[in-house]
Image (tube, helix red, strand yellow):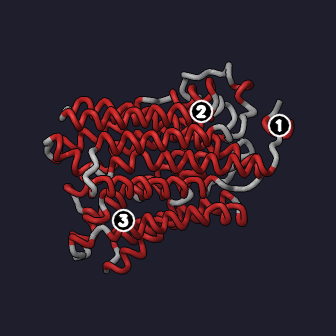
Amino acid sequence: MPRSAAADAHAPTPARIRGARAAAMVAFATNGALPASLLARYAEVKEALGLSPALFGLLVVGYAVGGTLAMHLPGVVSRRIGVARAAALGTVWVAAAFVVVAVGVTLGSPWIVLAGLMAAGCGDAVVDVAQNAQGIRVQEAGGRSVLNSMHAGWSVGAALGGGVGTLAAVLGVPLLAHLGVWSLICAASMALAARRFLPETTLALDAEAPTARPPGLRVAMLLAPLALVALAGISVEDVGNNWSAVLLASERDAPVAAAGVGLSVLLGAQFVGRLLGDRVVDRIGARPALLGSLSAVVVGMLGTAWAPSLALTLAALAVAGLGCAITVPLAFAGADALEGLPAHSGVTWISWTMRTVSIGLSPAIGGLTTVWSLPTALTLVTVIAVAALMLQLRPRRPSAAQH
């Protein structure tokens, strides 16, 4: 039975769709809230372990490495047990892994911390695929775009988790107690929310499809442009997270204490873009919205690199933040719609590509900065968004999946 026919046969009621949308929003929020609460106390973790900045940097990259090592596992898990259980059990796994991290910090063992971070990263990859798959299912059932607002929910959760972590640090709450309670709250919230997920209509059809093989050449060629779209989005986030403050302080003469305003501007613009993204997609269509967002990323990144003043640089960061807001959700939706892949495999491969590239992206920017300059390095990184835009501007073949 085609996907559309199966969907018609199991059409959920509007109330059911609204409930599932709220549940998926909880999934995204808890997925952001869990790691952010630990991130807020990273300075304390570094001090407790007595690590140099270099060693601490190697330690915390374990989270991304764990997600990369998961490879095709998230898609397999979601197909075998369903996205509701995958999201719920994956969140429990991540929560438990962060408790392990806290135990490692308490015992002063970097190796336990590393094991916990890698385990958490692996579980996060599973949850990431499951929650996006459910978001796409809700989007299809409701007949309108909602995935962008769900990613905005992740931003809200991250802000909440970071606030809780900061408050716990200020109050002197031990890390183990803080993460133990917060992990329990997030895991319980996700377990309750998963009960309202929409059932999948393609799971049985795809259950016997290959699960461990990489995509064939034809599908890989279709995935590549979508992967570039997602990478264009995370490149902006990486620049904002790791290099915006450095750029403002070293190239725009901003006071060091105030250099973090660049990240705040970018993330604020991204959040607004995600809140408004679904309306834009519904009004003008996914492809025009994607072309506009990629164009904004290119303009914003180049402006960030070469703007002659602090004010113009902040404006450029806002443009880049708005542009990257909907790139990843649209890439996930497009990958999910590709034919020739088992259910959730497209989302899995896009997620894996982002995690893999993100490990080396910031070090690459640092290396390019050493050879040339930070503005030059940011310009070269913008090539990702330019390539994504050029591929999206190609004439569309009838067999290409719509997104």
Residue kind at label 1, given as amino acid type: His
Residue lying at 41% horizontally and 45% vertically, measured from the top left: 182
Residue kind at label 3, given as amino acid type: Leu
Q: Position of residue 275 (x, y in %)?
A: 59, 64
Q: Which residue is mark 1?
A: 10
Disc 1, SS: loop
Q: Which residue is mark 2?
A: 345
* Tag in front: 2 or 1: 1
* Tag in front: 2 or 3: 3
Above or below — where is 381 with respect to 284? above
Q: Toward the viewer: 374 or 26?
A: 26
Q: Position of residue 133 (x, y in %)?
A: 62, 40
Q: Position of residue 73 (x, y in %)?
A: 51, 27
Q: Residues within 10 Å of mark 3 (few under 14, many from 20)?
A: many
> Residue 263 bears which disc, if any?
3
Q: Specify the quadrant that holds the N terminus.
A: top right
